[in-house]
């Protein structure tokens, strides 16, 4: 018989049993929730806790969200946009890590409510850099210009396209959930050589435009984020278009389209955040008077810009004021401009004003059809693309 000279310490046994039990603690199940509409800051952090989580925060009436504490946590959104690891220390001494999370914001809000939010909160969102990380747009209302097509065939065709779109979204969502359940790492996309060259050329253009006295002098925050926004848009387009996206490079056309879309959002941000001196310089009544004059003098053919300087409204006969007003009309989708040698022609948008203009019959006064002309985007030589189609009187806030 063996007798222990050192009795087993009951406290040690209990401590060892506790540690063993704690190590065998089951892991929390992976949350399958990917959509939310109204959450608090604490709840958002809780949903995103863990590794490679994804969530879409979507609201078509975002006034409640903007008035909550959630939209005041600019640092949280900036960190999520950059993909940084976030450590949350809680009062009960537990620690939560948010690693590799992906958050999508898609919010719609009436302009007056959004403007009141900006007045109340000042420039906090822009000063923190959050505004530059969000894709903003304020499309013009189409009320009074919407048309109902009685032909069923286009509607059936649209339904088929919508069905394919929904099917692809469903496939990607399921793939994302499955990849996370299996612990698969995310795939990093790469560009073709032509797409890389386009990316570098556009980067250099945007960088130059941020110099003192240049186009983006007052919008350097948006300019600094432009190429990353374009890259993210290109990635979304690429993944959506290719079933085998992980084995295919992002091509030139996809990158070009992404840059054009990023330019639209950049132009919208420049309108929404127009510098104080620019706001004083550009009178929206001049813009509306110019549009009214174009509609009244529209005879089915393109109007020369020089004709507006000769006989148009007096408030826009000055070249700079006319260019400013035209850029707003282009951005709003009211007009489409074309260039032939040194002449600039203005055309009412056939999409927005179908009663006045039809694309198939649009010619210059000398009979040249628009298909033979180059589209003109304003004095800055196509750096900012026009908005092809607007939707409604809401501000869209898209991000991450």
Image (cartoon, rainbow, N blue to C red):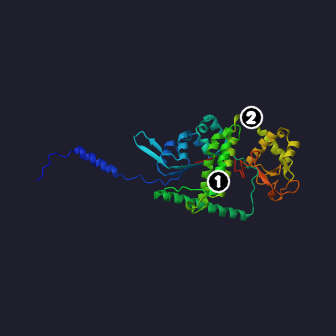
User: Can you say whether 195 is above or below 66 in the image?
Assistant: below
Task: Report the residue at 27% width, 45% height from top.
Answer: 15
Q: Give left or right: position of 125 versus 344.
A: left
Return the disc, 2 or 1, that comes first in the chain's sequence: 1
Assess disc 2: are there few (<14), some (14-19) or many (≥20) residues with their C-alpha within 10 Å of its C-alpha: few
Residue count near mark 1 (Cα–Cα under 10 Å), binned few <14, some 14–19, many ≥20: few
Q: Quadrant of residue 122?
A: top right
The residue identified by callout 1 is 197
Q: Nearer the viewer, residue 20 or 162?
A: 20
Q: Nearer the viewer, residue 178 or 40?
A: 178
- Provide residue 361's location: percent of width, then percent of height: 83, 58
Identify the residue at horizontal 40%, vertical 43% (top origin). Answer: 94
| Residue 268: numbered disc | none
Where residue 252 sits, quadrant-wise, is bottom right
Q: Secondary structure at mark 1?
A: helix
SS for dot 2: helix
Q: Relative to 213, is 94 on the left or the right?
A: left
Relative vertical location of residue 85 with respect to residue 182 in this rendering, above or below: above
**CA gap, disc 2 to disc 1?**
39 Å
Residue 371 in view (yes/no) = yes
Residue 280 is tagged as 2
Q: Are marks 2 and 1 in contact (CB under 8 Å)?
A: no
Q: Residue 53, position in %: x, y?
A: 49, 51
Position in image of residue 251 (x %, y %): 63, 58
């Amino acid at each position: 018989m063996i007798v222990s000279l050192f009795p087993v310490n009951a406290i040690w046994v209990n401590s060892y049993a506790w540690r063993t039990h704690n190590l065998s603690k089951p892991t929390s199940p992976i949350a399958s929730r990917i959509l939310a509409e109204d959450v608090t800051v604490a709840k958002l952090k809780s949903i995103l806790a863990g590794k490679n989580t994804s969530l879409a925060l979507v609201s078509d009436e975002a006034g409640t969200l903007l008035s909550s504490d959630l939209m005041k946590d600019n640092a949280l959104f900036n960190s999520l946009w950059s993909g940084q690891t976030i450590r949350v220390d809680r009062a009960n001494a537990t620690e939560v890590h948010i690693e590799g999370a992906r958050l999508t914001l898609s919010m719609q809000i009436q302009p007056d409510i959004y403007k009141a939010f900006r007045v109340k909160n000042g420039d906090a969102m822009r000063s923190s850099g959050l505004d530059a990380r969000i894709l903003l747009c304020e499309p013009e209302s189409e009320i009074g210009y919407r048309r109902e097509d009685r032909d069923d065939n286009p509607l059936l065709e649209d339904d088929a396209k919508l069905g394919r779109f929904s099917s692809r979204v469903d496939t990607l969502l399921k793939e994302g959930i499955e990849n996370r359940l299996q612990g698969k790492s995310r795939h990093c996309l790469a560009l073709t050589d032509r797409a890389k060259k386009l990316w570098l050329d556009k980067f250099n253009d945007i960088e130059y435009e941020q110099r003192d006295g240049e186009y983006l002098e007052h919008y350097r925050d948006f300019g600094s984020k432009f190429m990353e926004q374009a890259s993210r848009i290109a990635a979304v387009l690429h993944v959506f278009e290719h079933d085998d996206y992980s084995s295919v490079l992002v091509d030139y056309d996809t990158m070009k389209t992404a840059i054009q879309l990023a330019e639209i959002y950049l132009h919208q941000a420049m309108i929404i955040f127009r510098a104080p001196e620019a706001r004083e310089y550009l009178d929206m009544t001049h813009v509306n008077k110019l549009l009214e004059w174009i509609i009244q003098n529209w005879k089915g053919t393109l109007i020369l810009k020089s004709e507006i300087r000769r006989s148009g409204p007096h408030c826009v006969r000055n070249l700079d004021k006319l260019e400013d007003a035209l850029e707003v009309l282009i951005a709003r989708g009211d007009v489409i401009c074309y260039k032939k040698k040194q002449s600039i022609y203005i055309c009412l948008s056939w999409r927005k004003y179908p009663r006045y203009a039809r694309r198939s019959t649009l010619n210059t006064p000398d009979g040249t059809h628009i298909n033979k002309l180059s589209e003109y985007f304003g004095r800055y030589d196509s750096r900012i693309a026009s908005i092809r189609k607007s939707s409604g009187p809401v501000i869209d806030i898209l991000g991450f």
